[in-house]
Image: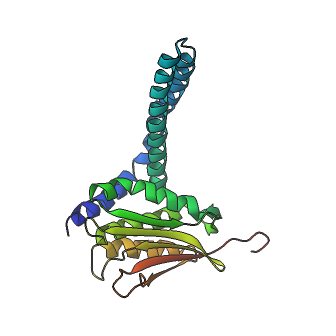
């Protein structure tokens, strides 16, 4: 299937980058912080322009640059987050922003292969107990597996929400048994087991719909151990 070799290479590159990215995080953040500061100076300067049309035009340029800088900053922070090594910490982590991060991170590969992302992420929080870096890696592995299984011009689905006392994240399509995505799925399952979660493969809905992977973790409730 076109693009699958590229996705496998992406996963291998991510493993290599994980060894070096934390050490260069400062070098990546520094220029972005400088850009943010400079844009604030430019915004103030443009706001003092006397001629209204020229002032608004210059402020418009600053707004465009500010939006692109924020987008770049978010992508860099997501990338550094995926490169972080698990600390083994047990803390309350909201799965919702991690699911949104994954959607943003996969936007480039999805766009390149003209794959549509259908996402249904509930508004409410999904607090679980676990290690943030480990949870990120679980979702990334399953996202890469879904990319490997999806055909060009196809669809990847991402859903997240509560189901009873469980936080659930679903990603599809699930790769066929023996496909290159299996390695990613096995890694996700092993990591998830360390957090007391489960990974199951479920029907996509209609008979002909692709199967999906479902991550389930107990929801954290205040006052409960």
* Residue displayed at 44% across by 47% down: 75
Q: Which of 21 and 58 lies nearest the eye of the viewer?
A: 58
Measured as percent of width and height from the top left, residue 66 is found at 49, 33
Above or below, comparing residue 5 to residue 24 in the picture? below
Above or below, comparing residue 206 to residue 107 in the picture? below
Q: Is residue 101 left or right of residue 185?
A: right
Which residue reaches farthest right?
A: 223
Above or below, comparing residue 97 to residue 51 in the picture? below
Measured as percent of width and height from the top left, residue 74 is found at 49, 45
Question: Which of the image's four quarters has the C terminus?
Answer: bottom right
Q: Which of 119 and 106 lies nearest the eye of the viewer?
A: 119
* Residue displayed at 47% across by 17% down: 54
Measured as percent of width and height from the top left, residue 185 is found at 39, 74
Q: How many marks?
A: 0
Q: Which of 154 and 140 lies nearest the eye of the viewer?
A: 154
Residue 49, quarter of the rendered image: top right
* Residue displayed at 44% across by 50% down: 79
Residue 205, quarter of the rendered image: bottom left
Above or below, comparing residue 48 to residue 141 in the picture? above
Which residue reaches farthest bottom?
A: 207
- Asked whether residue 5 appears in the rendered view, the answer is yes
Which residue reaches farthest left?
A: 2
- Asked whether residue 87 appears in the rendered view, the answer is no
Which residue reaches farthest top?
A: 50
* Residue displayed at 40% across by 85% down: 206
Query: Tell me, what colour scheme is on the image?
Result: rainbow
Q: Is residue 110 left or right of residue 167?
A: left
Question: Which of the image's four quarters has the N terminus?
Answer: bottom left
Measured as percent of width and height from the top left, residue 69 is found at 46, 36
């Amino acid at each position: 299937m076109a693009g699958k070799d590229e996705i496998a290479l992406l996963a291998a590159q991510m493993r290599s980058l994980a060894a070096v990215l934390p050490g260069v995080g400062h070098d990546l953040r520094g220029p972005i912080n400088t850009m943010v500061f400079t844009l604030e100076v430019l915004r103030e300067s443009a706001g003092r322009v006397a001629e209204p049309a020229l002032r608004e035009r210059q402020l418009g340029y600053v707004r465009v640059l500010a939006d692109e800088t924020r987008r770049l900053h978010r992508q860099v922070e997501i990338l550094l987050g995926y490169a972080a090594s698990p600390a083994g910490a047990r803390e309350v982590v909201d799965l919702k922003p991690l699911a949104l991060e994954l959607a943003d991170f996969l936007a480039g590969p999805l766009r390149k292969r003209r794959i549509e992302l259908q996402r249904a992420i509930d508004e409410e929080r999904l607090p679980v107990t676990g290690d943030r870096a480990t949870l990120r890696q679980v979702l990334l592995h399953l996202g890469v597996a879904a990319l490997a299984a999806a055909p060009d011009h196809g669809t990847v689905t991402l859903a997240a929400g509560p189901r009873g006392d469980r936080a659930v994240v679903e990603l599809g399509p699930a790769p066929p048994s023996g496909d290159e995505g299996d390695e990613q799925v096995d890694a996700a399952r092993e990591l998830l087991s360390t957090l007391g979660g489960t990974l199951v493969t479920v029907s996509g809905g209609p008979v002909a719909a692709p199967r999906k992977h479902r991550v389930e973790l107990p929801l954290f409730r205040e006052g409960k151990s």
